[in-house]
Amino acid sequence: MIETETMPVPADSAESRRYNRIKRWMGVGDFALGLGLLIVLLATGWTGTLRDLALRGASQNYTFAVFLYVLMLMLISKVIGLPLDYYGFRLEHRFHLSNQRLRSWLWDEFKSMLVGLMLATIAVELIYSLLRHVPQYWWLIAWAVFLGLIVLLAQLAPVVLFPIFYKFEPLENEELKRRLTVLSERAGTRVRGVYRWHLSEKSKKANAALTGLGTTRRIILADTLLDNYSDDEIEAVLAHELGHHVHKHILKSILVQAGITFGGFWLANEVLRYAVERRHLFETMSDFANFPLLILVSTVLSFLLMPALNAYSRFNERQADRYCFESVASVEPFISSMSKLAEQNLAEKEPARWVEWLFHSHPAIAKRVAAAEGWARAH
């Protein structure tokens, strides 16, 4: 039996509580701004004005007009949200969690907007092309295509999207690489490489992940983790990530997302038909001025499902933790890594129950540590 001394988890510092409280209010503010913008666009008819401007700018070319509309919508949203985004940038510096300079942050914001514009344009052009040509079945076809895009993005993200914002290089610590590769093989997954993630150029927080699918599956370890954690602690962190693979959480999450997306597209179709055929708010289903209505349906549905999805995520995290306990020689490195991560990232160890229920996709760190200690005592 593995003996472990039960140590009380240090209480959250005033700094940690204040940081997380501000972050929560920022999230609420960001949600309120986005929701408010959608309601204003629809209630005032300004979405129709933007559509007319886009059509004139595109010389009545429908496809190009859709792009211009998406561009204007994103620019308006960015301008409205920029003060809050900048406050978030300053907040990370205020709590000594960021190394990023303003110029670098602005460049990241610009790149983020370009990537968002590209992805949004593909999605919106697809939706309105289907609404023009197959209005009866647009939502069903869009649902199937979106599922394919989700899988494709999961596969391409490590090699296409992540390098846009961060630098990666092969891990030079051969012994650690060997340990992590063996651990991965025991979990039944083949990784295509172990990479050092240069997170410290922008943040003082630590992180690690098993990313990608198939030929792009790789382990990425933040340099802030590599430089401050023992090999045993890093192995414990990765064992947790591998637990998601063993329990097929990626596949299950895709299936859950498939169900939610199916319901979302069906609901969007019903709401759109009601707005067009019963209320005559738009001339046709393919009038892209109704796009804010589609986003509004998605936003409200996501908000209503958030507690349930967070609960499901916490269940998955607990399963991944248990796999970690079973895979490492001792739970002590897991416990120490959790404590160090909490301190380094200013995470709340014991958030209020309603906070965890509503906002957290992971169990409270105090609960994870208690679970590790309980498992050790029982085994």
Image: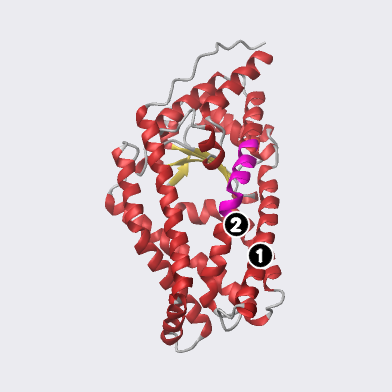
Would residue 175 be seen by someone viewing this image from the given angle?
A: no
How many other residues sit within 10 Å of disc 2, few (<14), some (14-19) or many (≥20)?
Answer: some
Per the image, label 2 sits on a secondary structure element best described as helix
Q: Alpha-carbon distance for marks 2 and 1?
A: 9 Å
Which residues lie in the magenta part?
302-315
The amino acid pointed to by label 2 is Leu
Secondary structure character of the magenta stretch overall:
helix
Q: Nearer the viewer, residue 229 or 176?
A: 229
Q: Is residue 63 left or right of residue 251?
A: left
Q: Nearer the viewer, residue 79 or 166?
A: 79
Q: Which residue bears the numbered disc 2?
A: 301
Would residue 351 be seen by someone viewing this image from the given angle?
A: yes
Q: Nearer the viewer, residue 303 or 275?
A: 275
Per the image, label 1 sits on a secondary structure element best described as helix
Residue at position x 53%, y 72% from top? Answer: 291
Q: Which residue bears the numbered disc 1?
A: 267
Which quadrant of the figure contains the N terminus?
A: top right
